[in-house]
Amino acid sequence: MATRFDPIRDLDRFFSEVTRTPNSTSLPMDLYRDGEVFVARIDMPGVDPSSIDVDVEDRTLTVRAQRQSEVADKDVKWLTRERTTGTYARQLTLGNRVALDRIQADYQDGVLSLTIPVAEEARPRKITVSHSNPTTRVTEAVETSPAQDEDPASA
């Protein structure tokens, strides 16, 4: 089989392979709020579940994972290689409104799901207004006549 030499295509392939670095676009994410929790769903196909690391430090949540090649590079001649391998990382800055100690992570079918609860103090509250009806007491003052200084016998 004859191979056609195309220097532009070969240079383009060379530079794309040399400059290929895992980035956040390699781990697409959906983030939404569902009631009292935030949910992040991060696509991680082909990642070994034991390589997934999720940690929180200074309100920054970091997700790291590693994807290995299933093929030994030295024994094959690649025709095209679009599935990147290596270590991937994705970071989220969390605000004060989340409960850091209650974050949960689950990996299923190539998707990492993070459940991030809203902090109790950040949840909206309804404050009930009590109505006090103080009873007004009216005390009647009974007037007493001043004691007469006169002696009844003297009258």
Image (cartoon, helix red, strand yellow):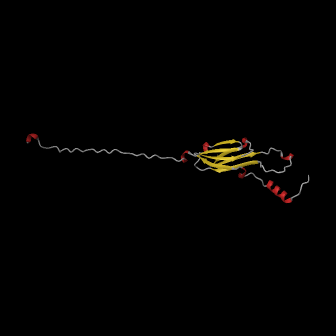
x then y, percent, for residue 135:
34, 44
Task: Answer left or right for 141 relative to 108.
Answer: left
x then y, percent, for residue 5:
88, 57
x then y, percent, for residue 97:
57, 48
Residue farthest to the right?
1
Foreground pick, 42 / 57: 42
In this picture, is 60 found above or below 6? above
Foreground pick, 131 / 122: 131
Question: Looking at the rendering, in which quadrant would you find the C terminus?
Answer: top left
How many labels sit on residues?
A: 0
x then y, percent, for residue 103:
62, 43
Q: Dividing the picture into quarters, in which one does residue 112 lie?
A: top right
Q: Residue at x 86, y 59 (%)?
A: 7
Residue farthest to the top?
153
Residue farthest to the left?
155
Residue farthest to the front?
1
